[in-house]
Image (spheres, grey):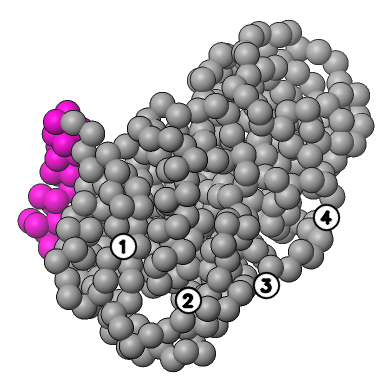
Amino acid sequence: MSGILACHKPILAAMKRVYCERLHGIPVIPLLLPNFKEDLPTHAPALHHSSLSGCGAVRGSASGMSEAGGNSTENSVWGSTRQLFQKEAFRDLRDPLVEIVADPAQADVHLLPHNYPLVAGNTDYLRRCRETAVRHNKKIVVFWHGDGMGPVALENSIVFRTSQYASKLRKNEHIMPAYAEDLKGKGLFVRDKTDTPPVIGFCGWAQYKNAKNAVGSFLQALPHEAYAALTGYPQSLSFIKGLKLRRRVLASLSRSKRIRTNFLLRSSHSAHAKTIRLDPSRARREYIENMLASDFVLCIRGDGNYSLRFYEALSLGRVPILLNTDVRLPLDDVVEYSDFVVKIHIADMLRIDEIVAEFWALQTEQSWFIMQIRARDAFEKYLSAPRFLAYAVEHLF
């Protein structure tokens, strides 16, 4: 086994000037954490309303953003007491990537400073943001980290979102990576190519919590399965939520002699305080150890059409097996995903063992080594939270 060297080049991005109105008591998006260091995630915020206040233009200071009254919410984008592990994704996000200005006319773009689901129901706030942007002929940059796939109720917006179907992606939308912790410090090494069958790993939610969960999954999948059977159009299976797809694929792989399995199946989502059923430190340790002990990591969508596991696997230099549920990956015009990802068409989900075994047989020691290096390199250069945000500011705003 060989070590993977992680480089630490400075993030380079053109400093853009942004104007935004902040809702007091609601977390800011990670892009603004270097500007609001006091907002670095430590605990769930106490939320309350406040009236609109004046703002002064200063770089890297909270006084450069106006505040407005907002709706109370229990959701957060990062590291609250409910969303476990996510705050670690931003530990290297130290230097401001944008300059906050007080005058909306002086901004390059306007920015929604909160994760969109947190303010989607606050129509008055969104109307103010829209009217201000229209009055100054500016675009509004919006971040939507989460499972939702609906439209953003803001005209003239540039939307960055984690979840969407490739066939339904709107012209103003960009797919962004999920905010994933860089796990390089947990044991980064390259796995050797062997003559034995490859190991496919999976640790996560793949068991029904109860009968209600099982029935709900069945009913949600039924129309999509029926349509695929009647029309011969397997792509409709992409609309089935991840739990059902995971169970089907994992059962198929468990019966195979072509590959070796390294599965740790759980009956709940272990990255959220409300659903985790075991000690968080143990859950995290087992999750990481599972990936490190595997050649490939099985990555299948959750409720949203994206996989956080996909990015965490890349951070460890592991090769993801990505079930293509009409997925669009971030920066796919820049990142050569085919160099380090095994993408499986939804119609072939019960043939993953055959496809992976054939792929494994074609690899040499050198090609397998390079593939793992490229996986880590893509995460480090483009797909970690700090790197993607820097790229987005510089090239996509």
Distance from disc 4 to disc 2, alpha carbons, whole Å, reads: 38 Å
* Circle 2: residue type: Arg
Residue 162 appears left or right of 143: left
Q: Main secondary structure of the magenta part?
A: helix
- Secondary structure at numbered mark 1: strand
Distance from disc 3 to disc 4, alpha carbons, whole Å, reads: 27 Å
Label annotation for residue 262: 1
Which image quadrant is residue 76 in? Answer: top right
Judge by depth and name the residue closer to the eye, 97 or 82: 82
Whether pointer 4 and pointer 1 mark residues with C-beta atoms closer than 8 Å, the reply is no
Q: Residues within 10 Å of mark 4 (few under 14, many from 20)?
A: few
Q: Residues within 10 Å of mark 1 (few under 14, many from 20)?
A: some
* Circle 3: residue type: Leu
Label annotation for residue 14: 4
Give the image location of residue 171, x and y in percent. 53, 52
Task: Report the span colored magenta.
Answer: 211-232
**Lower position in the chain sequence, tag 1 or tag 2:** 2
Mark in front: 4 vs 2: 2
Q: Residues within 10 Å of mark 2 (few under 14, many from 20)?
A: some
Mark in front: 4 vs 1: 1
Distance from disc 1 to disc 3, alpha carbons, whole Å, reads: 26 Å
Q: In this figure, which residue is indicated by the disc labeled 3? A: 5
Give the answer, above or below, for where 154 lies relative to 361. above
Judge by depth and name the residue closer to the eye, 299 or 59: 299
Query: Residue lying farthest left?
Result: 230
Work out whether residue 55 can be spotted.
Answer: yes
* Circle 1: residue type: Asn
Whether pointer 3 and pointer 2 mark residues with C-beta atoms closer than 8 Å, the reply is no
Whether pointer 1 and pointer 2 mark residues with C-beta atoms closer than 8 Å, the reply is no
> Does residue 222 belong to the magenta stretch?
yes
Q: Residue at x 52, y 82 (%)?
A: 369
